[in-house]
Amino acid sequence: MIQLIRGFKDILPGEAELWQEIERVSRDLFESFGFKEIRIPVMEKTELFARSIGEHTDIVEKEMYTFPDRKGDLITLRPEATASIVRSYVQHKMYAADPVRKFYTIGPMFRRERPQKGRYRQFYQINAEVIGVDAPYIDAQLIFLLATLLERLKVTDVAAHINSLGCPECRPAFREALTALLDGKKERLCEDCARRSGTNPLRVLDCKVPACREAMADAPSLLEYLCEGCKAHFDSVQRSLNRLGVPFVIDKKLVRGLDYYTRTTFEIQTGALGAQSAVAGGGRYDGLIKMLDGPDTPAIGFAIGLDRLAEIVGLRQADLEKKPRLFIAALGDACAEKAFDWICRLGLAGVHAEMDMADRSLKSQMKQADRCGADLVLILGESELASGSAVLRNMRTKEQAAVVIDDQTAARLLAHIQ
Ligand code: HAM
């Protein structure tokens, strides 16, 4: 038997209804806040991700699915969506008509990480990005949107963590201080961090390995190094969140795993997923559009891990399951032909009706009706056909109604159902 690839998974019917509901609630919310859907390809030139996410990040160094296509060009299955959205914004000169754009997109991403609960090699993200707005209001609005979405999906046990990563003006001094501190601690760090301390020292701050945590306990905070502009921006985000009533914690060790971030960064963390605590993450990337050859334009966004969200939502799969409204137990060819005609007409009218197509006994058809969960059952045998009337039974209330059998029966059934 051929099985699926490690770290990949099927979303089976049942679970898929839960995903649809999450997507529906997300789309509704985004559209109420002026976001427009954008669909981008699942593959891009490798260079796009290497340049934007950063050569010295885990994603680019060891997690991307990169391969030469048949002509030898290096292409990569997208590990995230932000880089592609920015590429699209720049490529189509969307800034020319209106530099301010709000996008959302939902789809699969690919990272070759070690699979475990909440961590897959193909996973799905719900992304929201706002390009062209510098004001800290938008930072607060995005975090507010995330909090609202989680509330609507009945997710509990989550906390919004926020931090500021400064800007090219103030971050270098912090980086220097951190590098100096790390120089004296290299032998206490894990293998990854010892290597990263030279190339990407900020990442050492949020390493989960206990030895690294201990070594970094007295690390300076970026917040102490923020320039006036970044400090005022971060203070303003916090004031807006307080006014909106969104609870948050300032997490000075939150640095995120992608290099493009500036100023506000945030994560929604949960205790419900074991080691994989981040349900969503995002932040500002004010330098990325220029870096990808567009105009100097600020931007901010987030991505929710849909797989992780589906595991912690408070919605019950059983409540979302869709069942047929009607089952027709038809006995013999003549009855089956009529039943077939009616279920097709009902389907066209938007009502799901089922029948048995294998000429089974009444007993087994009734079992089938029960299994599929239809509320209404119509029994149609030779005698019903002859008398021109059949009984429609409501399996929950036990109420019965007579339905005339003629060329209007599908409409009559529809009237009973609606
Ligand atoms: P990220 O933190 O790398 O950010 O991913 C966002 C979310 O995707 C994570 O919080 C997590 O829920 C989910 N996720 C990531 N990797 C996996 C995995 N292997 N398995 C399951 N879920 C996963 C970004 O991707 C940025 N592009 C977010 C962003 C948008 N920043 C600005 N705009």
Image (cartoon, rainbow, N blue to C red):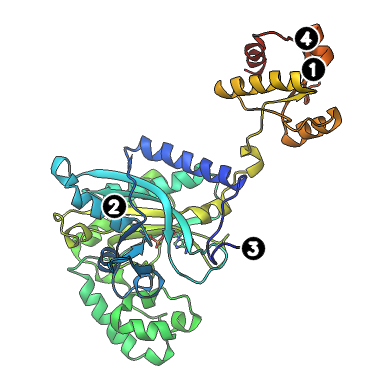
For image coordinates 62% across by 17% down, the residue present is: 418
Q: Is residue 248 visible?
A: no
Return the x and y of residue 286 as percentages of the image width and height.
Answer: 22, 58
| Crowd rating for badge 4 (residues with CA inside 10 Å; few <14, some 14–19, many 20+) | some
Amino acid on which the number 4 mark rests in the picture: Ser
Q: Nearer the viewer, residue 379 or 178?
A: 379
Q: Are marks 4 and 1 in contact (CB under 8 Å)?
A: no
Whole-number angstrom distance, CA of label 3 to CA of label 1: 48 Å
Q: Who's the residue at 84% across and 30% down the image?
A: 361
Numbered disc 3: secondary structure: loop
Q: Secondary structure at mark 2?
A: helix
Query: Which residue matches tag 2?
Result: 85
Residue type at mark 1?
Glu
How far apart are labels 1 and 2 at the CA level? 56 Å
Nearest the camera: 217 or 281? 281
Q: Secondary structure at mark 1?
A: loop
Instruction: Please report contact status of discs 4 and 3: CB closer than 8 Å, yes or no.
Output: no
Q: CA distance from mark 4 to mark 1?
A: 16 Å
Which label sits on residue 389?
4
Can you identify the residue that label 1 sits on? 399
Amino acid type of the residue tagged 3 in the rendering: Met
Where residue 240 sits: x, y (%)?
33, 48
Please identify the quadrant where the N terminus is shown: bottom right
Between circles 2 and 3, the one closer to the viewer is 3
Residue that mark 3 sits on: 1
